[in-house]
Amino acid sequence: MLVKHEIKSQLAKLLATEDLIVENKKVDTAEFNVHTRVLTLPRWEQASNNVYDSLVAHEVGHALFTPDVDWRETHDIPHVFVNVVEDVRIEKLMRRKYAGISKTFYNGYHELSDNDFFDLDGKDISDLNLADRINIYNKIGNFVDVSFSDAEKKIVSLIEKCETFEEVLDVSKVLYDYCKQQQEEDAQEEVEGNIEMQPTQGGGTSLDNSEKTEEKEEVDLDYQPESSEQGFDEQQSDSTNTGSPEKPTAAGTRGSDTSEPEVKTADALANALKDLVGQGGRENVYVEIPKLKLEDVLIPNKNIHDECQQCWDEYLLSDSGKVYENDDEINQEEMTAKYYRYLPVHGLKGVDREFEKFKKSAQKEVNYLVKEFECKKSASAYARATVAKTGVLDTSKLHTYKYNEDLFKKVTIIPEGKNHGLIFILDWSGSMSDVMIDTLKQLYNLLWFCKKVNIPFDVYAFSNNHPGQYSNDTREYAYEPKEGSLEVCRWFSLLNMFTSSVNGKTLDQQMKNIFRIAYSFRNSVRYHCPQSLSLSGTPLNESLIALHQIIPQFKDKNKVEKVQCVILTDGEAYPLRYHREVQRNWEDSPYLGTNETGEHTFLRDRKTGKTYKLSWNYHESTDVYLKNLRDNFPNSNFIGIRIMGSRDAGSFMRRYCQHGQEYDTIQKRWRKDKCFSIKNSGYHTYFGLSSNDLSNDDEFEVKDDATKAEIKRAFIKSLKTKKLNKKILGEFVDLVA
């Protein structure tokens, strides 16, 4: 029977009442590190649920009750004896803490007993030493008969009464000394028996042992835990001493001075449990998110726009800039034919006119958003409002005292809502070139909205091409790479393109700068753009990792309580790799390389105590990083805006929706509105937008001699984009309000 290791890990955490770090690995035995709070469980894939649960409960007992102390410095006792006594104590405390755990232990040990995990088949239990019998008695004593002498019963009673680890150590010493004494006595008797059976000088055999005695070592049974009700009477076992010199040890018999007592049943159980461990498949790997040096990742807002200004200052000083910018009123077709045949026609002034035209047309949508936001915010506040009596008489109601008891003035209390802030992550990859200008228009609507309602914001564009990969081949990681940490691309950068901390005039110029760059991706232009701001790969997952540090920094800077993170992208990112040490034969020290994540890779978060299963699949790995963000920042919303073509919409919907009512509903909305929203992804809400509809010109323009049919088509076309924008922006406002 295969076991869901993630479920058993959660069981361990629940039993421990803390977010233990649980690792399922290909190890022989379970182990709990009381210092690091890491519980390592073997992959008992062949174990039943009863056995698995009992083993987990046992190890959690160690996690809860075994202290983090190095007792070997003060007690010279073999570890196995301490473990036998400690097992009794922690399982007793687990039964006391969880009443239902007794049944779990009973069923689990019953199976272990039936399958002879203690290697008792064909053996006489009475021949085992006391430690073995105590181990059996406390684990499977319900299913086998275990007998003790009167002296042994007192030690058993001491073990059962242990409440503290200090008592465990003291009783373990008593148990160990007793077992060692018994072993020495047994070895001595065997030696003497062999000697007595040897022929005498007269040819007979000496059987007279009446004069030979042995003085037994005294075992201290006077120890009593503080919690015990009564102790032991001191016991001594006096025997006559033979007075004979040292006798030789019989062949095959271990002398008392060279052997230590063993707990064979503990070894048998450990060896049997190894058979439950699954040997197939890869070893589980646990990785963690590294802490980035943000100063090496974030490119300041001022630096970006200084680069833009420098680039265009150089362009304006060039011959091309002088011609196109100074003679801007000349017909563009004439300019192309006259100066630059087959060359682009737009200079900076032409693109800036396009920006101003869009800005003017967008104000109606922005004002609509503001109005809707204020209405929904007021409605939300009203819904949370409470009415309370003031204790002051309302004189206008005094005349109703005969039939009305409510004569006091009332006050309506409207609780303050949380302060919001927005962080935008913009996909600055090469595949966005065709839709970048339309994506920016959506983004600009939201930025103008935030500016009008005084919501602080920051916009970052992710890139792995700043300032250019070939400008600095020795670029270091923006963190300290180590074994088990995720790899963040050396060239990963977040470009702070816009921020609410600048004034309105500066923001307008910055929006114009980025509009110029985005416009050049889909249109032929004469001017050049900064090489450092060219499109690159898709370090989306790296951006999600950086948000772990950006969000707290943003909240502290802007004094906001809740952050909305909006990610605008057109695709998935490649799964992250992780650092792994490899020992190569020709090197003395291990080499720190990287490896791919896969089905046996787990993301471990020490802050939340949660573990997430990673995947080689593109979208699944991104969803894991998003879920981890949501667990770390429960007061933040993570919103995805996915821009896609019609042929990509079907596969995207099937990825998150099974065929059924939900899938049919979303598909119908896509056909009608060319947009939809999904709730069951890594995002709180994942919007899907049609790239074709976004790129439609939303202006109502017709020729002077246009027919009625042409006017109708132009009007429908202009409304289509406006309708799409309003739907998406309206749902977005709902989340913020």
Image: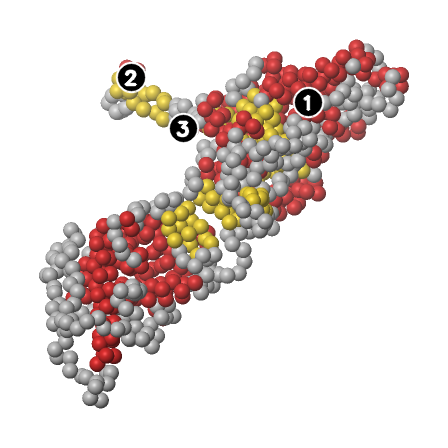
Q: Residue at x 57, y 47 (%)?
A: 587
Return the residue at label 3.
384
- 2 and 3 marks in contact (CB < 8 Å): no
Identity of the amino acid at label 2? Asp
Is any atom of residue 145 visible in this view?
A: no
Identity of the amino acid at label 3? Arg
Provide residue 654's location: percent of width, then percent of height. Answer: 62, 47
Task: Measure the C-alpha gap from mark 1 to mark 2.
Answer: 61 Å
Provide residue 124's location: percent of width, then percent of height. Answer: 28, 75
Q: In this view, does 699 lie above or below 314?
A: below
Q: Is residue 411 left or right of residue 228?
A: right
Return the residue at label 1.
515
For the residue labelled by badge 3, is the local secondary structure a helix, a strand or a loop?
loop
- 1 and 2 marks in contact (CB < 8 Å): no
Give whichever of 506, 672 is nearer the camera. Answer: 506
Identity of the amino acid at label 1? Phe
